[in-house]
Image: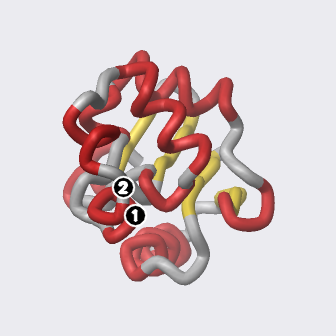
Amino acid sequence: MIKLYGIANCDTMKKARKWLEKNNLEYEFHDYKKSGVPEKNLEQWVKEAGWEVVLNKRGTTWRKLDETIKSNINKNSAIAVMMENPSAIKRPVLESDNILLIGFKEDEYQVLL
């Protein structure tokens, strides 16, 4: 079963969900805003993909962080920032069996799913 993590009103999330539905792939959606961030999962994503990939440095949430936090970011502080600010996690995060995809790239979805 595919599990998709993110925020419902995010445009990239909408693209990923639309792609999955168009390709008749069932998935379970986990909304960070409603259900929070599963810390165990976040730690596993960081372990597998690296905090640099999981942390969204392009978004408003990152830009609003204190410069001291941004300039001293490391694995542990990145996890803390993402736990406290779910919008700082790159979206979507897709888990399925042994697949972990972070962000939406249609060609990656096509090949791996």
Left or right of residue 3, residue 74 in this image: left
- Report the amino acid beneath label 2: Leu
Left or right of residue 99, residue 53 in this image: left
Q: Which mark is residue 29?
A: none
Mark 2 lies on residue: 65
Residue 49 in picture, x, y percent from top left: 33, 26
Left or right of residue 73, residue 3 in this image: right
- Judged by depth in the image, the label closer to the viewer, 2 or 1, is 2
Closest to the observer, 109 or 52? 52
Residue at image position (22%, 61%) is 58
Closest to the observer, 95 or 54? 54
Q: In the picture shown, does residue 20 fall above or below 88? A: below
Measured in 3D between alpha carbons, the distance from the residue under mark 2 to the one under mark 1, in whole angstroms, is 7 Å
Image quarter where the N terminus lies is top right
Mark 1 lies on residue: 61
The crowding category of the residue bearing disc 1, from other C-alpha atoms within 10 Å (few below 14, some 14 to 19, many at least 20), is: some
Q: In the picture shown, does residue 95 fall above or below 87? A: above
Residue at image position (20%, 58%) is 107
Q: Are marks 2 and 1 in contact (CB under 8 Å)?
A: yes
Closest to the observer, 22 or 75? 75
Q: Is residue 3 visible?
A: yes
Closest to the observer, 102 or 7? 7
Residue 27 in picture, x, y percent from top left: 65, 58
Residue 36 in picture, x, y percent from top left: 73, 52
Residue 61 in picture, x, y percent from top left: 40, 63
Query: Which quarter of the figure has residue 24?
Result: bottom right
